[in-house]
């Protein structure tokens, strides 16, 4: 492989397999798509809940907006995690990063009197610093990213708890957006969009109205719009940019990538920064939607994001996957989580679902990968 070859954007396939240029049937090419398993799983989940929960309200306008909101928040994390996993690394600290960023915004507003927009900038500055630290520790020490970021998980969570309790005496910070609910910053992260459309749909009788004449659904959460934006951006980076080629190369074989001139260390550090920033975006949305912060925000979200990425076709060994697949993985999560709630099933079963889906996704991905490799 030459340096010129690895620097050219992949036009067709987001995987190293596609870059090798061998011919295959349309079916084989479809099997190579990392999104295939997640798309199939999404159809299956929708079909099952359509049969067993069709009258529960899950697929009403309100139900759809609810599971899209849950999916959107997780999908923001999953897109960034997918890129990092394609690059061959893991970040177990993003759940704690969510809590840390939430508290940073909350303390900045309520204890130090800073404007919300400035606290958000400060939170993202911390995210860049923490992501850089994670990346540098991984590339300079040679330690597995699993170990480095696992340490980060405990350090950040402990720091978040200690600082919040020391300053406020509590673990929760309320009234962050009080009096600023209609400000542009709050609306762009924690508001809703499409309210005019839903009002029109209610006026013509397509969706239900409340007693005061407002539609039952008054708009979609901005987390859904951010989810779409982050997924599109991540997909564009993977498929249309030199950096995307570098991500695949680093995840496939970082030694070979380094030998042909790929800045491996810079790529990995950049990916760790992206996951920390995605966690901060997630935290910002949650804080401005709810108007409060909690030191336990983001608990176990790192595992959910990894599972969503794996369901979406990302291999644990790196070098293969897509942001679109992670989007479908997040959609499956949101649908099942809200579907269990709407059907009245004990929510403890959701944990069973997470474990089962992870195992099934890994088995399916390994099978597809093996079949695609045999087709060479």
Image (cartoon, helix red, strand yellow):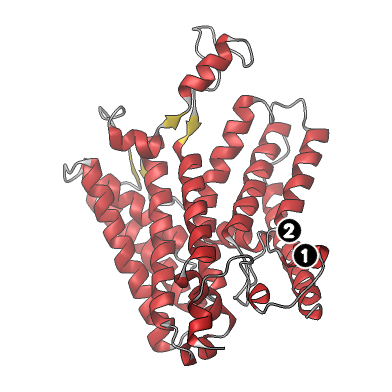
Q: Are marks 2 and 1 in contact (CB under 8 Å)?
A: yes
> Splitting the image into 4 quarters, where does residue 216 fall?
top right
Could you say whether the residue bearing mark 2 is in a helix, strand or loop?
helix
Q: In the rendering, at what x and y percent does residue 237 appear?
A: 48, 63
Residue 305 can be seen, yes or no: yes
Q: In the rendering, at what x and y percent does residue 117 appear?
A: 24, 44
Location of the C terminus by quadrant is bottom right
Location of the N terminus by quadrant is bottom right
Of 298 and 210, nearer the camera is 210
**Viewed as shown, does residue 49 lie left or right of 313?**
right
- The residue pinned by badge 2 equals 36
Q: Residue at x 62, y 77 (%)?
A: 317
Q: In the rendering, at what x and y percent does residue 141 appear?
A: 40, 88
Residue 252 versus residue 131 in the image, above or below: below
> Splitting the image into 4 quarters, where does residue 59 fall?
top right
**Viewed as shown, does residue 169 lie left or right of 115?**
right
Residue 7 versus residue 54 in the image, above or below: below
Could you say whether the residue bearing mark 1 is in a helix, strand or loop?
helix
Q: Residues within 10 Å of mark 2 (few under 14, many from 20)?
A: some
Q: Residues within 10 Å of mark 1 (few under 14, many from 20)?
A: some
Q: Which mark is residue 31?
A: 1
Residue 291 can be seen, yes or no: no
Q: Which mark is residue 231?
A: none
Q: Residue at x 29, y 48 (%)?
A: 105
Residue furthest to the bottom: 259
Give whichever of discs 2 and 1 has the lower sequence position: 1
């Amino acid at each position: 492989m030459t340096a010129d070859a690895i620097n050219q954007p992949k036009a067709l396939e987001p995987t190293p397999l596609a870059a090798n240029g061998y011919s295959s049937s349309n079916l084989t090419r479809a099997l190579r798509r990392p999104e295939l398993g997640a798309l199939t799983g999404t159809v299956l989940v929708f079909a099952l809940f359509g049969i067993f929960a069709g009258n529960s309200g899950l697929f009403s306008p309100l139900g759809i907006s609810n599971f899209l909101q849950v999916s959107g928040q997780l999908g923001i994390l999953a897109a960034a995690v997918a890129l990092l996993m394609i690059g061959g690394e893991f970040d177990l600290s993003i759940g704690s990063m969510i809590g840390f960023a939430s508290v940073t915004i909350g303390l900045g507003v309520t204890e130090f009197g800073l404007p919300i927009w400035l606290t958000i900038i400060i939170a993202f500055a911390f995210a860049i610093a923490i992501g850089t630290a994670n990346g540098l520790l991984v590339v300079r020490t040679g330690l597995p990213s699993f170990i480095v970021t696992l340490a980060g998980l405990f350090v950040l969570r402990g720091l978040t708890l200690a600082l919040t309790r020391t300053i406020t005496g509590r673990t929760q910070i309320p009234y962050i957006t009080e009096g600023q609910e209609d400000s542009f910053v709050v609306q762009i992260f924690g508001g809703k969009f499409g309210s005019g459309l839903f009002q029109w749909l209610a006026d013509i009788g397509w969706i239900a109205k409340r007693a005061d004449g407002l539609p039952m659904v008054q708009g979609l959460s901005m987390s859904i719009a951010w989810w779409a934006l982050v997924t599109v951006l991540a997909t564009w980076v993977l498929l249309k940019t030199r950096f995307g080629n570098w991500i695949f190369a680093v995840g496939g074989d970082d030694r070979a990538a380094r030998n042909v001139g790929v800045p491996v260390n810079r790529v990995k550090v950049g990916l760790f920064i992206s996951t920390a920033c995605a966690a901060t975006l997630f935290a910002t949305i949650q804080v401005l939607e709810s108007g409060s912060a909690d030191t336990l925000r983001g608990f176990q979200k790192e595992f959910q994001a990894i599972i969503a990425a794996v369901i979406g076709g990302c291999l644990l060994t790196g070098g293969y996957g897509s942001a679109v697949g992670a989007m479908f993985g997040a959609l499956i999560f949101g649908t099942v989580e809200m579907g269990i709630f709407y059907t009245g099933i004990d929510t403890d079963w959701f944990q069973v679902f997470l474990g089962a889906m992870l195992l099934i996704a890994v088995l399916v991905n390994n099978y597809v990968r093996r079949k695609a490799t045999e087709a060479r």
